[in-house]
Image: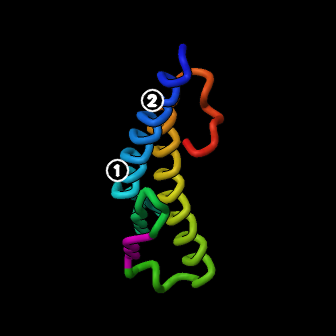
Amino acid sequence: MNMMKMMKQAQELQAKAAKLQAELASRQYEAEAAGGQIKAVATGEGQLVSLKIDPALLKDDAEMLEDLIVTAVREAIDKGKADAAKELGKLMPAGLGGLPGF
């Protein structure tokens, strides 16, 4: 394979990765805690965009409620990260999975 062809393929891969990253950033991921009484929604960039708490939980122990909120938020963010890793992994040719910048 000549160098020009490799460079072109690398540029195409980089463009595809950038497009996919933008798409992933706009996706939203929902997670629940306490049997659905807490719902967190985060973007693919890991930004919390929504948090819903069942009013019945507000009567409970504040520390427990805080832990449940953190759990739901982390799970929503982790779902986004896992989806991004899976989707970006599909772009990588065999043997190139560890290239920085991709």
Task: Give the residue type that dot 2 points to.
Answer: Lys
Q: Name the chief secondary structure element in magenta.
A: strand
Is residue 78 visible in this depiction of the protein? yes
Is residue 90 visible in this depiction of the protein? no
Q: Closer to the camera, 14 or 95?
A: 14
- Report the span colored magenta: 48-54
Q: Earlier in the sequence, mark 1 or mark 2?
A: 2
Residue 58 on the magenta segment: no
Look at mark 2 in the image and give the residue it sits on: 8
Instruction: Pinpoint residue 30: horizontal percent, then vertical percent.
Output: 39, 58
Q: Residue at x 62, y 81 (%)?
A: 63
Mark 2 neighbour density, 10 Å: few (under 14) some (14–19) many (20 or more):
few
Instruction: Pinpoint residue 12: horizontal percent, then vertical percent.
Output: 41, 34
- Name the secondary structure under disc 2: helix
Look at mark 1 in the image and give the residue it sits on: 23
Examine the rendered structure and indicate whether residue 32 appears above or below residue 9: below
Kindly report which numbered mark, 1 or 2, lies closer to the viewer in this rendering: 2
Examine the rendered structure and indicate whether residue 56 appears above or below residue 27: below
Query: Which numbered circle lies on residue 38?
Result: none
Task: Give the residue type that dot 1 points to.
Answer: Glu
Q: Is residue 42 left or right of residue 65?
A: left
Instruction: Pinpoint residue 69: horizontal percent, then vertical percent.
Output: 52, 72
- Name the secondary structure under disc 1: helix
Examine the rendered structure and indicate whether residue 4 appears above or below residue 83: above
